[in-house]
Amino acid sequence: MTRPAPVTFTAFDADAAAAHDGILAVIVPADGKLSQVARRVNRLTRGAVERATASPAWEKLSDGDLMDLAFPANAAASAVAVLRLPDRPDRDVAMRAGAALARLRGTRAVLLAAGKHRAAADVTLGLVLRDYDFTDHKTGDKPGDPAAVTVAVSKPDEATTTFDAHRAAAEGVFLTRDLVNAPANVLTPVTFAERLDSLRDLGVDVEVLEEDELERLGMHTLLAVGQGSAMPSKVVVMQWNGGGDEKPLALIGKGVTFDTGGISLKPGAGMEDMTMDMGGAGTVAGAMHAVATRRARANVVALVGLVENMPDGLAQRPGDVVTSMKGDTVEVINTDAEGRLVLCDVMWYAQDRFAPAGMIDLATLTGAIIVGLGHENAGVFSNDDALCDAFLAAAKAEGEGAWRMPLGAAYDKLLKSRVADMKNVGGRAAGSITAAQFLQRFVKDDTPWIHLDIAGVASVAKGTDLSPAGATGWGVRALDRLIADRFENAG
């Protein structure tokens, strides 16, 4: 697993700052007024910080940007980075400043002279999150462990405690990115289950349900998706029991490790991106890693359906009718609408076995959600306003875009089948909504539920403020915050 850069909080030491041979960074507000620690860095660099903030170039910057002063006089640093931030910045602005510092530093060590700045932890988190590179399959010179980040603050012990929870979330994000970035010949249903088994080291109970058990349970819609693959389908159940006798929150992840579309074959152009169709399961894994790492006082159960959708001679066909674990029959109109067939069985099993206090499923489910929301927001569908509002608040606090979408009985008419209880698709109109309506049929009346369609945010071609191109880890921090805010110490 890719590890985040090591971070240490310490008191400011002028001699250590003078000898630091990486990047020396300091925070200054737009008006150029220097804090006590910024004045010390300014003296160390013979007024370079003050000259920079008095320049016309400084005025052109926005909050969250930085100015790079290369090879400052009187210091060993290869650069001084002056971060433009107000004393009380919005969290996303502070994290964006940290991300800018990550892009500047490359492989160099960083000493951030933050002093009493209130956003030091958020700046550091932005740096750590952006400082990621997936190099597992590159040859030649391999980068070593990431260079250290040292943050000089007025209260190092307090800052360390605050950042520990951030560090746990960052590790979860990195696990998700590693999983989603992995090629499908490396991350199969078998190896994915093996990777999840390592969560035992953090105290998570891990159980793998094999195909014979899935057959016995009646998970025929899930098994139908994988029946054309040489790889066996699996369901992995992960339990974190930190909340006493409270009912758990259930997280459900779609884990299609590669999606050809099956017999309803996708176009060849861009099919290589379908290695990320297990993004929901990857996010669930990262969230469990974060929860267990910080020893959350909550009960969380996570279940992922791991399958590969291939066009073999044994693959399911358009027109097939399959029976779900619930007992409902589904006419398969399009074998490329396979994610909902995986999720519905796992969701029903989770409710039968765990009677959860709430259930959240995550899936790279529809291209329609990208048409509607682009790559800025995940689609949020829910049957429970309180749980939905709590999640949206958590996502906003973490700067992870999420937008609530409608549900309604009128959309059910699009799923009517002549030969079965329902079809697995409802046509082009309202495609992401009809997918959510399909899933809602497998939610029991007393279960608060959220469906997150993350097709547009799980992996992006050009990167984001906090992640390079490829997997983003979207949702790990929002879920972790939701659990901390709503489910820890419940009751």
Image (tube, rainbow, N blue to C red):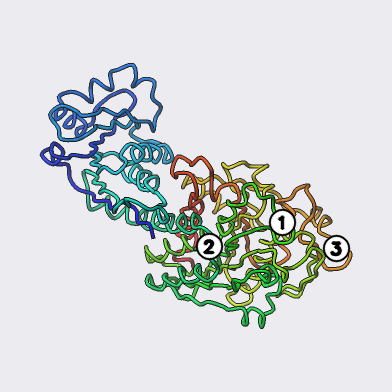
Query: Which residue occupies 67% across, 52% down?
Result: 366
Residue type at the position of mark 2: Asn
Relative side of 143 to 244, left or right: left
- Which residue is labeled 1 in the image? 265
Residue type at the position of mark 3: Ser
Q: Is residue 341 above or below residue 219?
A: above
Which of marks 3 and 1 precedes in the sequence? 1
- Most distant residue in the front direction: 140
- Which residue is labeled 2 in the image? 185
For numbered disc 1, what is the local secondary structure? loop
Which of marks 2 and 3 precedes in the sequence? 2
Q: Nearer the viewer, mark 3 or mark 2?
A: 2
Residue 116 is at least partly visible in this image: yes
Q: Are marks 3 and 2 in contact (CB under 8 Å)?
A: no
The quadrant of the image that shows the N terminus is bottom left
Callout count: 3
For numbered disc 3, what is the local secondary structure? loop
Residue 254 is at least partly visible in this image: no
Q: Are marks 2 and 1 in contact (CB under 8 Å)?
A: no
**Residue 278: image location, x then y, percent:** 57, 60
Measured in 3D between alpha carbons, the distance from the residue under mark 3 to the one under mark 2, in whole angstroms, is 36 Å
Measured in 3D between alpha carbons, the distance from the residue under mark 1 to the one under mark 3, in whole angstroms, is 22 Å
- Most distant residue in the right direction: 418
Query: Which residue occupies 38% across, 53% down?
Result: 139
Q: Is residue 268 above or below residue 211?
A: above
Relative side of 7 to 479, left or right: left
Q: Nearer the viewer, residue 393 or 10?
A: 10
Residue type at the position of mark 1: Leu
Q: Nearer the viewer, mark 1 or mark 3?
A: 1
Q: Nearer the viewer, residue 58 or 91?
A: 58
Name the image quarter holding residue 205.
bottom left
Name the image quarter holding residue 321.
bottom right
